[in-house]
Structure formats: C-alpha cells, structure tokens
Image (tube, rainbow, N blue to C red):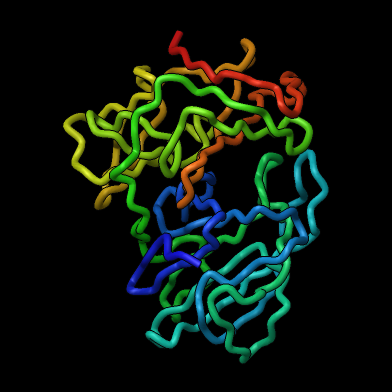
Amino acid sequence: MIAVAIAEGIKIYCMNNDRFAFFNSPYPAHRLMTGIDIYSDVNFEGLALSPVSGEVVLIRKIKAPIGRFFKDAGYDYVILLQNKQSKELVVKILHVDPCVSLGEHIHIGEPLGVLLRSGYFGFTTAPHVHVEVRPSNDPLRVRGGFIFKNLLNIDKSKPVERLKGIVKKIREDVFTVNLDNVLGFGLPADIGGIIGILDGGIPIYGWFGAHASGTPQGDIIKIMGVPVGKITKIHRNTFIAECLKFNFMINKIKVNLFLTMSSFRKQSIKIAPVKRGLLNLENGEEVEVKINND
C-alpha cells in the first residue's frame, strides 16, 4: 500500500496498481478537494480494502437515487472510522457494503466490504471507494471535510503531443484507451507554462483539476497546445480550472475524458461518447484522441 493523500495528518492509502482522483466527480467534496476516490482494478461487488486504520464507529445504510441507464444496488452505506491519531477526526467512507462491525479495529489494506454500484453514480462511473477526513462532530454532511494534499511526486512528468492507444471496452459506451506514448502519473498538460497532471471529467463537468510541483506563470491550461481551461483557484500545488470551449474527438465523435492518477508509469484514460450509442470501438483497436476548439 502507498500513501497518496493527506489531510490533518491522516494519510490515505491505496494499492500500488490502484488509481485515484480528487476531481473526477460533480459532487461538492470533489470540487473543494475534500474528497478522494480510489479505483481498484475489480468489478462491482469486488472486495474493497480499507484506505486507513481505525475503529469502526458508525455504519449507516442510506437511501440512494435510482441509477440512470443502469441498475443500481438500491442503497448505499456510510462507514466512519475513528483514527487513533485524534478523537476529533473521523474518516468517512462511501460506496462499500461493509463486512466489518461496529467497534471493530481495522488496519490499512484489510477487507472493508464489497463495492456498490450506487445510484449516486453516473453511467460511466467505475467501482471506487470515496474517502473524506472530517471533524468527528460533523461527520456526515456533504460539505465540511478537510482539504487533501496530493502526495504523488509528479516532477518527472513529460508533455504529450499525441493521445494514441489501444482500446479496452468496459461496457457499452464506456472504454479505456491504454496510451502508448504517455509516461508519468496521469495525463500531462501545460499548466500555465509548467508541466502538471490533469484530474477529473473533461469537459463533461465544465471544470477540472490539475496538479503540478511548480508555480504556473500564467492561468491557461493546454493539452497538445490547445487551450482547454483557465485556472480559477489555487490550493498549494493543486489548481481548479473552468473549461474553455473545445472538444475531444475520436473518429469525429465527441467524447468526454475521465482522468485519474496512479503511482505506476503505464497510463490509460477512460472515455465515453457525449451522446450514448454513437461510439463503436472494439477491443484491441488503435485510436487517437484529437482535440479542437472550433
């Protein structure tokens, strides 16, 4: 397990081959960088491992919306873990049907439960664990969590000139493209004149996040030389940008990109057509994601 984020001294861990994102969701905790999603390479109902150690102090089954275009689990869960570092802090975990019990002590990497396909998800949402660090006297609200710091070292990222790779079909209208020319910890971009990593659903949410180790000299974010966002908020070495006018295209079909980060070097991006049913790709097919701002 590796530490990928920290808030109020509590580190969040994931497996070496997991992906994670702070901004790959439209919900407020992600826009505020108070939530992190950890994506394991398992299907729904696969095993979820605990990202922290602590005592289980709350398990609550909650209602969830009906999934749009997919069958959801019919419910969701909130799990709270009390970290021994501070009785004033708890870790809030969502989207896991627990196999643990109240009062049980769980350690990093131990089974927490199975991954739910929640009605809070979109059609393209992959199985994941949602994590927040919160004050113990305000553990459940949508807002109010502590801001995370990304612990991934992205200094060695290099700019990308083309987005080409091999398709893997996940399900109808949802694909990954295993990039053959991107080395680093995510999708590199020009962040105001320095190289950083993008994070989030682009352009579907209208905004996205970016991470860089240096200080940008400007406020425009570019992919392959095309302006895609304008920085509107800076927190440490993380930036939030509003989308500019542009489109990602595969075979002349508009697509959205869902961007995560990882600690391993081989990168992939998840894609879905802007309108369902328009993009037909086969496993093993080579494609290129193009971008225009027409």
Residue 249 in sight in this render: yes
Q: Position of residue 40 (x, y in %)?
A: 62, 56
Q: Is residue 294 toward the left or the right of residue 287 in the image?
A: left
Q: Residue furthest bottom?
A: 103
Pick whichever, 71 or 154, lies toward us. 154
Pick whichever, 153 or 258, lies toward us. 153
Could you tell me which residue is drawn at 69 percent across and 86 percent down? 101
The picture quadrant where one finds residue 85 is bottom left
Could you tell me which residue is drawn at 73 percent across and 19 percent down? 278
Pick whichever, 177 or 272, lies toward us. 177
Q: Position of residue 197 (x, y in %)?
A: 38, 39
Could you tell me which residue is drawn at 32 percent across and 38 percent down? 196
Locate the C terminus and report the quarter of the image it occupies: top left
Q: Residue furthest right?
A: 71
Q: Is residue 278 toward the left or the right of residue 19 in the image?
A: right
When the figure is inspected, residue 34 is found, relative to residue 215, above or below; the finding is below
